[in-house]
Amino acid sequence: MSGLKTMIAAGAVICGMSGAAPAHDDLAYTFAECAGRFSAEMEHAWLMNDPGASDIAADRSSFVMLTSATMAPNDGRSILSHRIDVKLAHAALLQQATFGTTPARARSAQKVAQRHIATCRTLLLGS
């Protein structure tokens, strides 16, 4: 039952971020979302002993720097909170994709996670 709660929570965050009207249209929030996603990817890569973890960490660092460079001084807490929320949602997707007991849900979670990461990568030069 807790897996269902996780999927519902992740779905709510994903739907909220991918709707017609984003929660934040500020560039700093977009970079923070990607930093959160890459943080989740990096931790997952470490756990799975993925040799690509250092590349993921480099992308994460890029988004952390971009977030810092574009955020307004008074937005630090809000942006960090947003980044953490996105990280948790992305981590839930990765957990479902890797450890989910329903193959269709696992494939769906994997596709969504990959799509989000691909979207973030398009924001980096040299991608």
Image (tube, rainbow, N blue to C red):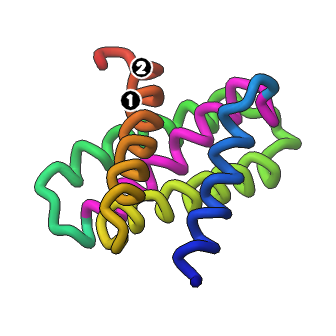
| Residue under the point 66% across and 33% down | 18
Q: Which is in the foreground here, disc 2 or disc 1? A: 1
Q: Are marks 2 and 1 in contact (CB under 8 Å)?
A: yes
For label 1, count other residues whose C-alpha is less than 10 Å away and answer few (under 14), some (14-19) or many (20+): few
Q: Is residue 47 above or below residue 123?
A: below
Left or right placement of residue 11 versus residue 73 in this view: left
Query: For mark 2, what is the residue?
Result: 122
Query: Which disc number belongs to residue 9?
Result: none
Give the magenta range. Answer: 22-45
In percent of width and height, residue 8 lies at 65, 63
| Residue under the point 21% across and 68% down | 48
Q: Is residue 42 visible?
A: no
Q: Which of 127 and 58 lies nearest the eye of the viewer?
A: 127
Q: Which of 16 and 24 lies nearest the eye of the viewer?
A: 16
- Going by the numbered disc 1, the residue's amino acid type is Ala
Answer with the quarter of the image where residue 127 lies. top left
| Residue under the point 63% across and 37% down | 68
Q: For marks 2 and 1, give the CA distance.
A: 6 Å
Query: For mark 1, what is the residue?
Result: 118
| Residue under the point 41% across and 65% down | 96
